[in-house]
Image (cartoon, rainbow, N blue to C red):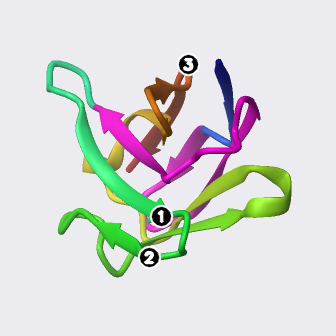
Amino acid sequence: QVQLVESGGGLVQVGGSLRLSCAASGSTFSISAMGWSRQAPGKQREWVATITSGGTTNYADSVKGRFTISRDNAKNTVYLQMNSLKLEDTAVYYCWLQASLHFWGQGTQVTVSS
């Protein structure tokens, strides 16, 4: 089993920045990718960014150029640096990990205010 613990969410003004962290523990030896998804109120959960075990990154068009995903393999931690935040970035952000199964974190709230 894998446990994922997110941190770093909060309230920020439009144009501001936040950095989310997600620490993985447990059976982390067969990770193929980690990433982030988000769910805004009344909307379906959507994919945000992925980083593979080899370091390849991919981003949703809505965050490309503003968000950066990175990973510290020694700490089994993935980060999401979010810059130039917009109102529409308000959501619960979920960390996920793909190994033999797919695991989700509990989510962290990000609220962007005007």
Quadrant in the picture for the N terminus: top right
In the rendered image, the residue lying farthest to the right is: 74
Q: Amino acid at mark 3?
A: Gln
Crowding near pointer 2: few (<14 within 10 Å), some, many (20+)? few
Q: Label 1's element? A: strand
Up-down relation of residue 91 to residue 85 (above or below): above
Which disc, if any, is residue 52? 1
User: Which residue corresponds to mark 2?
Assistant: 56
Up-down relation of residue 44 to residue 76 (above or below): above
User: Which residue corresponds to mark 3?
Assistant: 106
Judge from the rendering whether residue 48 lies leftward or rightward of residue 42; answer left or right: right
Does the magenta stretch mainly form a helix, a strand or a loop?
Answer: strand
Q: Position of residue 78 (x, y in %)?
A: 64, 54
Q: Amino acid at mark 1?
A: Thr
Crowding near pointer 1: few (<14 within 10 Å), some, many (20+)? some
Spatial distance from mark 2 to mark 3, Cα to Cα? 25 Å
Residue placed at 57% from the left, 40% from the top?
11
Is residue 38 in the magenta section? yes
Spatial distance from mark 2 to mark 1, Cα to Cα? 5 Å
Spatial distance from mark 1 to mark 3, Cα to Cα? 21 Å
Find the magenta span and give its range. Answer: 10-39
Depth check, front residue: 94 or 77: 77
Marks 2 and 1 in Cβ contact (< 8 Å): yes
Up-down relation of residue 17 to residue 113 (above or below): below
Residue placed at 65% from the left, 24% from the top?
2
Marks 1 and 3 in Cβ contact (< 8 Å): no
Q: Amino acid at mark 2?
A: Thr
Q: Position of residue 44 (x, y in %)?
A: 15, 26
Judge from the rendering whether residue 24 lies leftward or rightward of residue 64; answer left or right: right
